[in-house]
Image (cartoon, rainbow, N blue to C red):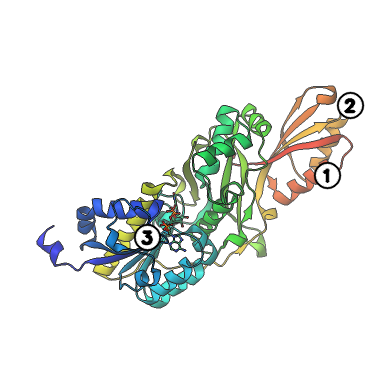
Amino acid sequence: MSERDKSAATIRIAMLGAGTVGTSVAQLLARHQHDLAHRVGAGLELVGVGVRDIGKPRVGIDESLITSDLESVVHSGADILIEVMGGIEPARSLILSAMQSGSSVITANKALMAQDGAALYQAAEQYGVDLYFEAAVAGAIPLIRPLRESLAGDRVTKVMGIVNGTTNFMLTKMDEEGADYDEVFDQANALGYLEADPALDVDGIDAAAKAAILAELAFHTRVTLADVYCEGIGEVTKADIQAAREMGFVIKLLAIAELVADTGEEDGIVVRVHPAMIPLHHPLANVRGSFNAVFIHAEAGGEMMFYGRGAGGDPTASAVLGDVVAAARHRVLGGRGPGESTYSGLQVLDIGRAETRYYVNLDVQDRPGVLAAIANAFAANGVSIQVVRQDGHGVEAGLVVRTHSGSESALRATVDQLRSMDEVRQVLGVMRVEGEE
Ligand code: NAP
């Protein structure tokens, strides 16, 4: 290290959690200490690591730093506290306490940010510290900083992405190997991809937390997990995936936040997570396995896509360390990063206000006039049909309909009407279609 580095103050770092992410953070901090010191203008020193079980082996972390006394870590006088323990409590109280003691906070905790981000932002403001959380959405992929800073001069109109690698892995397996849901669930479980509570992945809750964080940043409007419409992948069948393929589509679990503009008094945003069919030529269609990607549309910048590894120790630690460098630079040079920006205060609207397209798979009576009756049901609700495909005869008669764009509420009303018609024996599948212009 140069004389200048030596003379600069050391930035003291404390960390809560030393599991998958925390261990990688500690290892990368040690491995890249020389480079990081140059980038920050001061050395970075890990001064304490809080865990639950001090008996567990932690490769690459000095044993003397490890403690189960989390309060002592928080009050160690660190410049920066890294929170990579997860969960709401005690993480929330410990973060607030650290901020009160003057520490800037870096967290990877999407659940906490989506549920209680406002309280954390407020504390950061009150105590004049930084709050960064790049790792909370899409692991290594730079997404928070581009939305918060690089796109701050533009007007974002839509954010649409694949932000849960586990469900993307499962849907990719179903699509490429013809596997059914139960099989891929077991595979994901065996590989350790599923959260301890699998519902967080398969019911879309993890994706919804990330959607809330992205929506808040993109639209400068407070959005919490409770505002996000959420459907998981549990109802997606092999037949849906096959039907999608035959039409040139693939099924993905999408997180979508979009501006619903020019509608008078109720301008606002809709934030939703659900499986959707997207055309095979769409950039998100090629995001396979456990990768993540987020597609952003901004008025001046146009379309852009951010793609990479959405999870894993090192990828997530990369995002944490980027935040550490930013917060450490502020300690050395003065100043703070951006705080919460909710000045737009748009309404978060019901999913019924979203504009989308539907794919509807029907088991119908095989007799004259059925097609006309079904077309009338769509027309009666103001939904226009784009493509109809008829399969089979007799008891096997099937009809697949893809609509043009319509409001979610009109599309739902159409499906309700179809369900009540004599001509329709069963509505076999309904799925939204995204990414088609
Ligand atoms: P993990 O492997 O389960 O590690 C959690 C760590 O926190 C462990 O060291 C654990 O201690 C400690 N901990 C948890 N609860 C505690 C408590 N009540 N008291 C004391 N210590 C406690 O979790 P992870 O995968 O590293 O994830 C950490 C955070 O990063 C989460 O918020 C997660 O959502 C986020 N994240 C993870 C990934 C990823 O790929 N893993 C990606 C993006 C974001 P012990 O080791 O003693 O049990």
Q: As shown in the figure, which amino acid type bears the numbered disc 3?
A: Ile
Q: Residue at x 30, y 69 (%)?
A: 79
Looking at the image, do the residues carrying marks 2 and 3 touch, with CB atoms under 8 Å apart? no
- Judging by the rendered image, the residue that carries numbered circle 2 is 367
357 relative to 29 in the view: left or right: right
Above or below: residue 392 compared with residue 412: above
Q: Quadrant of ligand 1?
A: bottom left
**Marks 2 and 3, Cα distance to the nearest angstrom?**
72 Å
Question: Mark number for residue 354?
Answer: none
**Marks 3 and 1, Cα distance to the nearest angstrom?**
60 Å
Tag 3 or tag 2, which sits nearer the N-term?
Answer: 3
SS for tag 3?
loop
Above or below: residue 11 compared with residue 372: below
Tag 1 or tag 3, which sits nearer the N-term?
Answer: 3
Mark toward the viewer: 2 or 3: 3
- Judging by the rendered image, the residue that carries numbered circle 3 is 54
Furthest residue toward left: 3
* Quadrant (top left/top right/bottom left/bottom right) for the N terminus: bottom left
Where residue 271 sits in the image (x, y, percent)? 60, 55
Q: As shown in the figure, which amino acid type bears the numbered disc 1?
A: Gln
Q: As shown in the figure, which amino acid type bears the numbered disc 2?
A: Arg
Tally of marks: 3
- Judging by the rendered image, the residue that carries numbered circle 1 is 417
Q: Residue at x 57, y 45 (%)?
A: 254
Where residue 173 sits in the image (x, y, percent)? 55, 33
